[in-house]
Amino acid sequence: RCQLSKLVKHSLGNILDCELENLGDGPGSFDGIVSFLVFLHIPDKKSLLDICSKMLKSGGSIFVEDFYCRSPFSDIEVDSLQNDVFCKDVPTREEYISYTEAAGFRGVKFIEKSIEWKGYV
């Protein structure tokens, strides 16, 4: 309908366990990566972001919408994250930025949306 089927690739699987050569046309073949509340389910953010960086073309972009730890969680919140959301690790803002930059991303923008999303999560 919108003629994007040849331009958009959707991949399903565990990116930490897959052969990168089998994704798209392999490393360096993606213009962009978009993740809406998916990264929170993958505890190894460092490896995840490193793989994403490898998969992008030079000058490619990544957009990640995710949870982050604004302040220490209570035991009840930790339990809910693990058992209801299936999220084992929520990095702080500083950790997320550090992991992203360590993976080679530059010009990282961290946009706080907690107030807008508070009614939904």
Image: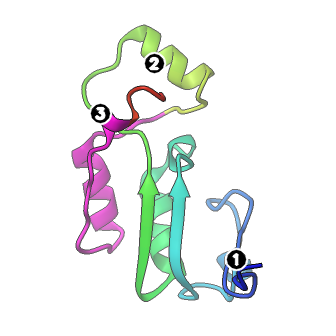
Above or below: residue 21 compared with residue 116: below
- Measured from the top left, where is residue 114 in percent x and y? 32, 36
Q: How far apart are the alpha carbons under marks 1 and 2?
A: 34 Å
Residue to which mark 3 is pinned: 115
Disc 3 is placed on an element classified as helix
Q: Is residue 117 magenta?
A: no
**Residue type, numbered disc 2:** Val
Residue drawn at x 54%, y 33% is: 87
Residue drawn at x 31%, y 51% is: 96
Dot in front, 1 or 2 = 1
Q: Earlier in the sequence, mark 1 or mark 2?
A: 1
Residue to which mark 2 is pinned: 78
Above or below: residue 99 compared with residue 55: above
Dot in front, 1 or 3 = 3
Q: Can you tell which mark lies on residue 9?
A: 1
- Colour basis: rainbow
Magenta residue span? 89-116
**Residue type, numbered disc 3:** Ile
Q: Which of marks 1 and 3 is nearer the N terminus?
A: 1
Residue found at the very far top of the displayed protein: 76
- In this rendered view, identify the residue nearer to me: 17 or 30: 30
Residue drawn at x 45%, y 74% is: 53
Above or below: residue 46 compared with residue 108: above
Q: How far apart are the alpha carbons under marks 2 and 3?
A: 20 Å
Residue drawn at x 72%, y 67% is: 11
